[in-house]
Structure formats: structure tokens, C-alpha cells
């Protein structure tokens, strides 16, 4: 690797962006040709083959065939034991009811665990690239359960996994039939005029767009907005930027247009190659060379339970937001409106994650600074895109940083920030409390207009369709 690095560093005349891409893809090639990735040069695999009289190699071959058959000839290593988990049985078990369903989402209202709750409900929008139950894997690390236990009425959106019939569904549909619709339903069920909204990753980006649309309509339904690992300023795309030049996006657009959806395979592989050693090569070695069964690991099970993206939405997001950065600059056209980041004027709480390889924390910080709100709180959590968010207080892990003083840039903010032990969850709840109204009697799921349709986690998360009704 040092020789490859030296060769790359000696190349002159490249733009910084091209140099970054060259460095990344050279590193990928070096990782791919690591001696441990080949049976003949992997001493651990050879030793196990000897100790088991070759049974480990037979088991590994069976694992290889299984993965090829499961993925229509594409080699995708199984990361977790698929038989160890059932959504609704040992994952996503927080009690609640589906109280609304349309062609894009199911809305889950969770059952209260306290006698009283805050007047202003919370509606949480998870990313539709993955499924919402990352926030409800098990009771011990469930953010959903934690919020309910703190005395809040919580609604969570569960997005449908689109098929080719959703080809022309775009960002406007997600804003109008997703965000605006969910907020209106929550207001009706709870009998309130305002909600506190939360968006995670791409759902946070789209929450920003929705807030701009609502502001233009003089709609004051959102009392505050919380953003988890959200990019609204894409001027620096971070690690994932190596996949956002035209040579890559042109291919993605052509594939999505032809298929009607951007298949989950492409998003999964893209994110996996950002952490290829952990998510591709090491699991492949254990499975195919060592003959080991995939572990019963809930996080990895969720990671493999991806969703497709509608073709139009995927292209609009990649072109207009990721590549052209229009929300933070000239304006992004959505729902008949030119949405701009300065239109986000409600109180804001934002969380970035220190080692996030998908939404770099300094880019997240920069977007928050461009928002028009006068009430902005930014928190930097330890760890990455998932572990930095799913970090319950009982674990006492990672820590987080806060800094209320103005800063010239993200690094200056970080240098002057104060580090706190443990999870940022209590700090967020403390921030929410004065923005959530008085205590009222706990609400049971549903209303006369929107009665309960069935128990959480609902139908869409397990692949059910609206047409099945």
C-alpha cells in the first residue's frame, strides 16, 4: 500500500476532487487484493481446513452457493442469520397501532407507558432507504421506546418498499403525500395545532424541504424540527462523494429509469464499499473460507433488509440535491415551490456523528448554520451513522459534544466544544420539554376519524402492499 500511495501522491495536475476519487478507488483495489482474501495466502483459513479435514471448505462452498442463489447470481455475502429474527416478534416490538395508511407510508402511533404525556406530539420520519426499525431493534436500545417512556406521544412513519409502479413518484410526492399528510393526521388524532418533527438522514433532508414548503403556505404546523445525521448542504459530499460524479450517477439514472426503481442492491453495495473491509471482505472470508455461519446480529440483519427507491425520486435527489446542491444555493423545486435552506425558521436540534461515512458531521453542521432559525442547537455524537444515533443512556458509550457559541467553521466549533459522557438522548429530551407544551392525559392510539388499522410494526415493513386490503 505505501508504494501505491506514493505513486498516487506523485501524480500532478489533478483537481482535488479527482485526486480524492483516485485515492479512494486505489485503496479499494489494494483492499481487494489483500492476501487474506485468497485461500492460498490466508493462513487461518488453511489451518482450519486442515483441522476440519476440509469440512470448512465444503461448508464455505455451500455458503457461497446459497448467496449466489439468493441474489440471482450476484455475489452478496450474507451478513446475519436470516432465521434468527422476525420483525414484530423479536425486532420492532414496542407496542402501538397503525392509525393511517396510504400508498407511501403507514403511520404508527405508539401506546403510552406513562399516565400523562406532553401536549405536543412527535412525528418521526426515518429514511426510506432502509426500514424504520433501526430505531426499535430491541427494548434495550430502542429510541422509540425511550421517547415513549419519557412521556411523549410518538408517531413513526413506516415507508412502503416501492415496486416499478412507483417509477414516477418524486420528491414532491414524498413531501405532499408523506410529510404534509402525516403531520395533518397526527394533528387530528391528538387534537393539536402543532407537532414536533424529526427526520433521519435523507428523511431529514426532505423534512427541510417540507418546512420550506409549509412556510411558503403560511402553515405553522411544525413547532420544532430535529435532524439526525442530515445533509442539507451538499457542497462537500464527504466520503460518499466518490460515487456522485456523472460517470456514476449517469449509470444509476439509466438503470433506475429502465427498471422503474433504483433497486436496493445498488444502494446497499455503494454503502458497503465505503466500509469494504468490515462489510464485504471480512464477512466473505468468514463465510466462504472459514465455513462459518452468519452471526445472529440484529443490526446486520436490518442492514440487509433494504428498500428500493422510486426512479424519479432517486434521480431528483442525486441530481438536484447531491450534485447541484440546490437546496442550499439557488433553490430546489418541490411541490410547486423553490425550497431554500434559509426557509427553515423553526427551532432546530441537529445531531451529527463523529465518524459518519454517509453524512459527514461537518457538512451537517454547515447546513444547520445556513438555516434561518434563530434557535439552533447542534450536537456532535461519538461513533458513526447508526451507532451514534442508536446510543441508549444505559450503555454509557461514545459521548457527545456541545457548543452554543458562534464558530467560524466546523473545526473551530469542535475545538471549543465541551465533551459530555454517555448518550445525547437525555439532552435532546431536555431540549424538547419546553417546546412540547403542558402535560395532558395519555392518549391511546387512533381517533374516530383515524381508527387503529392493526398492530405495530404494520404491514409495509414486512413487504405488504396497499392493494392487499
Image (tube, grey):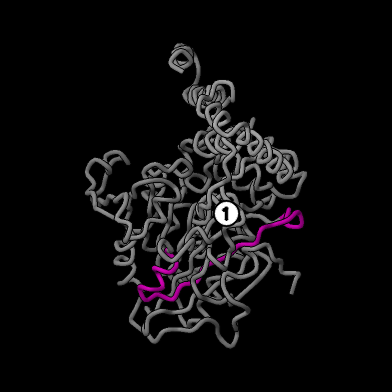
Q: Is residue 243 above or below residue 380?
A: above
Give neighbour class at mark 1: few <14, some 14-19, many 20+ (Cα, 10 Å).
many
Residue 344: image quadrant is bottom left
Q: Is residue 154 magenta?
A: yes
302 on left or right of 1: right
Residue in the image at 57% along x and 68% along y: 88
Image coordinates of residue 53 in percent, x first then y, are 61, 31
Q: Give the extent of the magenta segment.
A: 143-168
Q: Is residue 464 magenta?
A: no
The residue tagged 1 is 130
Q: Is residue 3 above or below residue 348?
A: above
Image coordinates of residue 436 in percent, x first then y, are 36, 74
Quadrant where the C terminus sits is bottom right
Residue in the image at 41% along x and 56% along y: 390
Number of numbered callouts drawn: 1
Q: Is residue 135 above or below residue 331?
A: below
Image coordinates of residue 240 in percent, x first then y, are 51, 37
Q: Nearer the viewer, residue 246 or 339?
A: 246
438 on left or right of 276: left
Residue 214 visible in the displayed image: yes
Residue 450: image quadrant is bottom right
Residue 181 visible in the displayed image: no
Q: Nearer the viewer, residue 305 or 242?
A: 305
Q: Nearer the viewer, residue 217 or 85?
A: 85
**Dot 1 lies on which element?**
loop
Residue in the image at 43% along x and 43% along y: 356
Residue in the image at 34% along x and 78% along y: 437
Image coordinates of residue 176 in percent, x first then y, are 61, 64
Amino acid at each position: 500500500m505505501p508504494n501505491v500511495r506514493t505513486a498516487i501522491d506523485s501524480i500532478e495536475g489533478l483537481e482535488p476532487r479527482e485526486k480524492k476519487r483516485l485515492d479512494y478507488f486505489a485503496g479499494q483495489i489494494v483492499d481487494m487484493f489483500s492476501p487474506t482474501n485468497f485461500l492460498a495466502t490466508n493462513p487461518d483459513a488453511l489451518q482450519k481446513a486442515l483441522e476440519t479435514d476440509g469440512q470448512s471448505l465444503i461448508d464455505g462452498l455451500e455458503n457461497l452457493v446459497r448467496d449466489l442463489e439468493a441474489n440471482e447470481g450476484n455475489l452478496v455475502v450474507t451478513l446475519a442469520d436470516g432465521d434468527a429474527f422476525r420483525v414484530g416478534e423479536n425486532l420492532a416490538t414496542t407496542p402501538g397501532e397503525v392509525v393511517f395508511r396510504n400508498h407511501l407510508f403507514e403511520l404508527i402511533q405508539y401506546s403510552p407507558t406513562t399516565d400523562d404525556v406532553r401536549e405536543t406530539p412527535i412525528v418521526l420520519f426515518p429514511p426510506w432507504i432502509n426500514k424504520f426499525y433501526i430505531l426499535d431493534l430491541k427494548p434495550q436500545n430502542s429510541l422509540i421506546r425511550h421517547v415513549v417512556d419519557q412521556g411523549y406521544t410518538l408517531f413513526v412513519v413506516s415507508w412502503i418498499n416501492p415496486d416499478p409502479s412507483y417509477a414516477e413518484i418524486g420528491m414532491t410526492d414524498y413531501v405532499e403525500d408523506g410529510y404534509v399528510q402525516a403531520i395533518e393526521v397526527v394533528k387530528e388524532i391528538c387534537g393539536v395545532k402543532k407537532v414536533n418533527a424529526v427526520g433521519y438522514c435523507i428523511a431529514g433532508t426532505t423534512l427541510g424541504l417540507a418546512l420550506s414548503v409549509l412556510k411558503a403556505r403560511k402553515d405553522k404546523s411544525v413547532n420544532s424540527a430535529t435532524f439526525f445525521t442530515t445533509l442539507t448542504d451538499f457542497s462537500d459530499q464527504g466520503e460518499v462523494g466518490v460515487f456522485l460524479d456523472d460517470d456514476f450517477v449517469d449509470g444509476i439514472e439509466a438503470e433506475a429509469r429502465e427498471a422503474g426503481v433504483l433497486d436496493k442492491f445498488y444502494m446497499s453495495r455503494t454503502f458497503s464499499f465505503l466500509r469494504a473491509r468490515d462489510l464485504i471482505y471480512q464477512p466473505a472470508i468468514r463465510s466462504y473460507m472459514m465455513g462459518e455461519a452468519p452471526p445472529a446480529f440484529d443490526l446486520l440483519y436490518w442492514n440487509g433488509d433494504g428498500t428500493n427507491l422510486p426512479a424519479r425520486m432517486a434521480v431528483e435527489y442525486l441530481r438536484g440535491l447531491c450534485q447541484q446542491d440546490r437546496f442550499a444555493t439557488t433553490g430546489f423545486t418541490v411541490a410547486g415551490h423553490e425550497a431554500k435552506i434559509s426557509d427553515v425558521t423553526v427551532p432546530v436540534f441537529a445531531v451529527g456523528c463523529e465518524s459518519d461515512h454517509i453524512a459527514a458531521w461537518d457538512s451537517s453542521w454547515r447546513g444547520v448554520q445556513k438555516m434561518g432559525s434563530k434557535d439552533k442547537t447542534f450536537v456532535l455524537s461519538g461513533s458513526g451513522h447508526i451507532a451514534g444515533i442508536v446510543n441508549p443512556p444505559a450503555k454509557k458509550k461514545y459521548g457527545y459534544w456541545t457548543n452554543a457559541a458562534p464558530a467560524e467553521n466546523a473545526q473551530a466549533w469542535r475545538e471549543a466544544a465541551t465533551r459530555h459522557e454517555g448518550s445525547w438522548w437525555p439532552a435532546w429530551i431536555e431540549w424538547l420539554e419546553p417546546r412540547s407544551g403542558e402535560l395532558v392525559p395519555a392518549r391511546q392510539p387512533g381517533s374516530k376519524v383515524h381508527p387503529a388499522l392493526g398492530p405495530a410494526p404494520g404491514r409495509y415493513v414486512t413487504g405488504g402492499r396497499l392493494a392487499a386490503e
